[in-house]
Image (cartoon, helix red, strand yellow):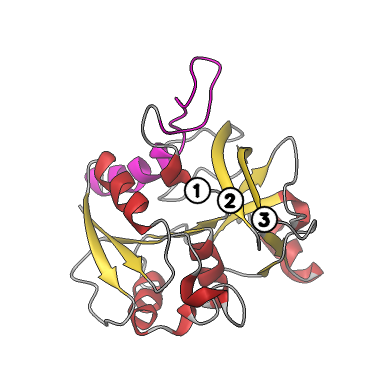
Amino acid sequence: MRVGVVTFPGSLDDRDAQRAVRRAGAEAVPLWHGDHDLQGVDAIVLPGGFSYGDYLRPGAIAAIAPVMTEVISAANSGMPVLGICNGFQILVEAHLLPGGLIRNAHQQFIRRDQQLIVENNETVWTRLFNQGEEITIPLKNGDGGYIADAETLKRIEGEGLVAFRYAGVNPNGSLNDIAGLTNEQGNVVGLMPHPEHAVEPGFGPDTPEAMRSGLDGLRMFESVVRSFVTA
């Protein structure tokens, strides 16, 4: 399986996402923001960072980058697409996911190991989790507050489109504690925390077993690989 990882000007975690893809057993394929060629990949990751310096709004310029024409078309045709942090912001700005993301409620950048509840394990990116499972994923953002109007929130909740919800503490003021969303088809998922930083022993979140031993993020990448193996 080939998973493309898009690099935009200002991307920060594209190499980390590529490593996560490889650890899940797939081939990581670098994609460039200025190209229209997806190089025959089977899935796409939009990584974290500060694309185009977060000018206008985080993700706003990246959402109209040349490569996004192809990403949007592929996503609408059913290709798995994962947006992480800035990638989530890009998915929202590209209207592949509903709502918006604004400055954290406390107006400060936050960095922490964050507990999440898996709300939807029926997407191609979450199928190796258990419904209601609590996981720990690193979080780092300044513009992670999820917002939507009342009607959109009602639809999101009613249709089960919340993929992940913050547990223990809401770190950025997101409405309904929303940490991540899926689209109706379950092929597009976006979340603010960084699963690519919880894929390798010695580099993930602390767990009761050992420091830096958390691997909860790896299952997101293994989920999409498994979906192709069992297809």
Foreground label between 3 and 1: 3
- x and y percentages locating residue 47 in the rendered image: 42, 60
Badge 3 amino acid: Phe
Q: Earlier in the sequence, mark 3 or mark 1?
A: 3
User: Does residue 166 show up magenta in the picture?
Assistant: no
Left or right of 178? Residue 29 is left
Given contact means CB atoms under 8 Å apart, are the residues at marks 2 and 1 in contact?
yes
Can residue 184 be seen in this snapshot? no
Left or right of 42? Residue 164 is right
Residue designated by label 3: 109
Badge 1 amino acid: His
Residue 140's disc number: 2
How dense is the environment of label 2, judged by Cα within 10 Å: few (below 14), some, or many (20 and up)? Answer: some
Left or right of 54? Residue 52 is left
Given contact means CB atoms under 8 Å apart, are the residues at marks 2 and 3 in contact?
yes
Magenta residues? 203-229
